[in-house]
Amino acid sequence: MERMTDELRRLTDDMFETMYAARGIGLAAPQVGREERLAVVDIEDNPIVVVNPQIVLADGSARGEEGCLSIPEVFGEVDRATRITVRALDRNGEPFELEATDLLARCLQHEIDHLHGKLFIDYLSFLKRRAALAKWESMKKDFPRNLRKVPANEIAGRHGEEAL
């Protein structure tokens, strides 16, 4: 994707709406059936759009629990860099660099992984991945079309904090 269009800006708006409705903090285009290399994240009321993101610096390491809107209610411990620099285009197609630490760094790495076809469970050991997939298989019927249902009164005016 070399430039932003009105259609892509609408897509980012729709992705934010979907992410908030599911009480998430990040969402990548492939999670909503799109091939564009873009993702949205919102940590502490700071919505960010990254288009064609590249991690140009990664430093440190910390283990932390992650979940994913693609496989609701399944969680696992994943090692991620604690500080990263991401180079991307913003919602208007302007290039920018973003230094991120802690939860924002984890979230950006998680969403950029989606753009490469990777899920957080791919980082788990064979046994933990197998257990996570078995849990998901047993719960799939509760999430038609992989959607988490959130009561409308929980959505109003609230940004998510639950899954990446």
Image: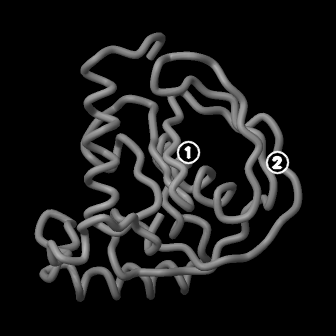
Please tell me how many numbered marks the rendered image carries.
Answer: 2
Location of residue 19 (image quadrant)? bottom left
**Precedes in sequence: disc 1 or disc 2:** 2
- Expressed as whole percent of the image width and height from the top left, the position of residue 30 reads 35, 43
The way the protein has been coloured in the rendering is one colour
- Expressed as whole percent of the image width and height from the top left, the position of residue 83 reads 81, 54
Q: Amino acid at mark 2?
A: Ala
> Residue 49 versus residue 64: which sits nearer the camera?
49
Q: Residue at x 44, y 17 (%)?
A: 1
Q: Residue at x 40, y 67 (%)?
A: 160
Q: Identify residue for label 2.
A: 58
Location of residue 13 (image quadrant)? top left
Horizontal relation, residue 21 to residue 40: left or right: left
Q: Amino acid at mark 1?
A: Ile
- Expressed as whole percent of the image width and height from the top left, the position of residue 5 reads 33, 14
Horizontal relation, residue 80 to residue 122: left or right: right
Residue 26 numbered tag = none
Q: Residue furthest front?
A: 157
Residue 112 numbered tag = 1
Q: Residue at x 14, y 63 (%)?
A: 145
> Residue 85 versus residue 154: which sits nearer the camera?
154
Q: Residue at x 35, y 69 (%)?
A: 23
Q: Secondary structure at mark 2?
A: strand
- Does the residue at mark 1 contact the one at mark 2 (Cβ under 8 Å)? no
Q: Secondary structure at mark 1?
A: helix
Q: Residues within 10 Å of mark 2 (few under 14, many from 20)?
A: some
Horizontal relation, residue 164 to residue 70: left or right: right
Q: Residue furthest top?
A: 2
- Expressed as whole percent of the image width and height from the top left, the position of residue 16 reads 34, 48
Q: Residues within 10 Å of mark 1 (few under 14, many from 20)?
A: many
Q: Is residue 160 above or below residue 52?
A: below
